[in-house]
Amino acid sequence: MKLVLFCDYGLDDAAATADALAHAKEDGYDGVDLVAIGGNVPADIALRNAKKLVANLQYAPLPVTVVDTTDIPQPAEYLAAIHGGDGMGDLFEERACPSEVKKFEEWLAEFSGEYILISLGPMTLVGALLQKKQPAKFIFMGGNVSEVPNYGKYEFNHGVNPAVFAECVKFPHIAVTMDTCRNPRLNIQQKEIGEKDVMRRIVGRSRELTFGTGEKGCYIWDDIAIKYLRHPDWFSLWKGTDLDGNKLTVARYEHDKEYLDIINE
């Protein structure tokens, strides 16, 4: 079984990727593909950040492929105030990437086998993979049912490309939405981060930047999708309809622990 992550590499994508790679071998995956897409940053910056992240993380050896989508036009922002000057918190050194890098078209043409799909950014390119082969599980961070939007009238990953979002959520899925993430137990803005392993460095930088942007809380959005993947028993599921009429199967966090207590679980 392969794990495929579509990430628009900002800080929460970095946390989610670090979390997934730290446990991928023990979770039984035989490889991880990181598809670097436009969203929080343009696709070329996302690609640079994906390679930088893989080069700086420590994880049990298994094949990791970085997928380059820069040849495909994609909508994107550059949210430096939220994600730092390099789009990923300015935390990691430039190092040679040890992983294979493939162009998206080549990767998609060759793609086969069972996989789990995690979408952590806009779904601009996700539909192409869903149409080729449906995953064993499809989990995404995006959308909202009852929470106040943060990007125009939408949650960011939904709002960057609403039409594509609507098509992708027709496939069986679990949605980790703004409603999921804005649980008081998951808010770390007023928490002391403590020891600085790689996850806490990323989370601490996310928290630090929220004080400059005036955010009313700090949630490591994308990593909650990884927590659902690894610990579905921490969540309940409910059916919701968003403002566009999209039917979502939404995860609700029910665990009694706070985020910093589960950060490396």
Image: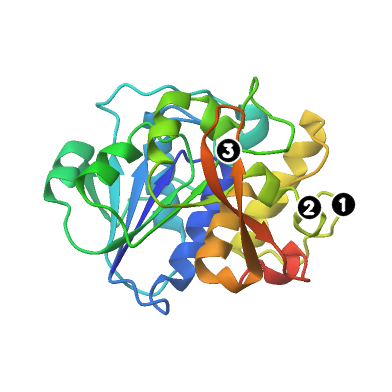
In which image quadrant can residue 88 be found?
top right
How far across and how far down the image is residue 215, in percent?
79, 34
Residue at the (74%, 65%) spot, across then down:
260
Position of residue 113 relative to residue 67, above or below, is: below
* Element under disc 1: loop
Residue at the (33%, 71%) spot, across then down:
29
Circle 1 packing at 10 Å, graded few (<14), some (14-19), many (20+), is few
Which residue, given by chain and number where applicable, does mark 1 sit on?
190
Looking at marks 3 and 1 on the same chain, the residue that comes earlier in the sequence is marked by 3
Residue 143's tag is 3
Residue at the (33%, 35%) spot, across then down:
125
Lateral position of residue 186 relative to residue 239, left or right: right
Which residue, given by chain and number where applicable, does mark 2 sit on?
187
How far across and how far down the image is residue 72, in percent?
27, 26
* Element under disc 3: loop
Hey, what amino acid is under mark 2?
Asn
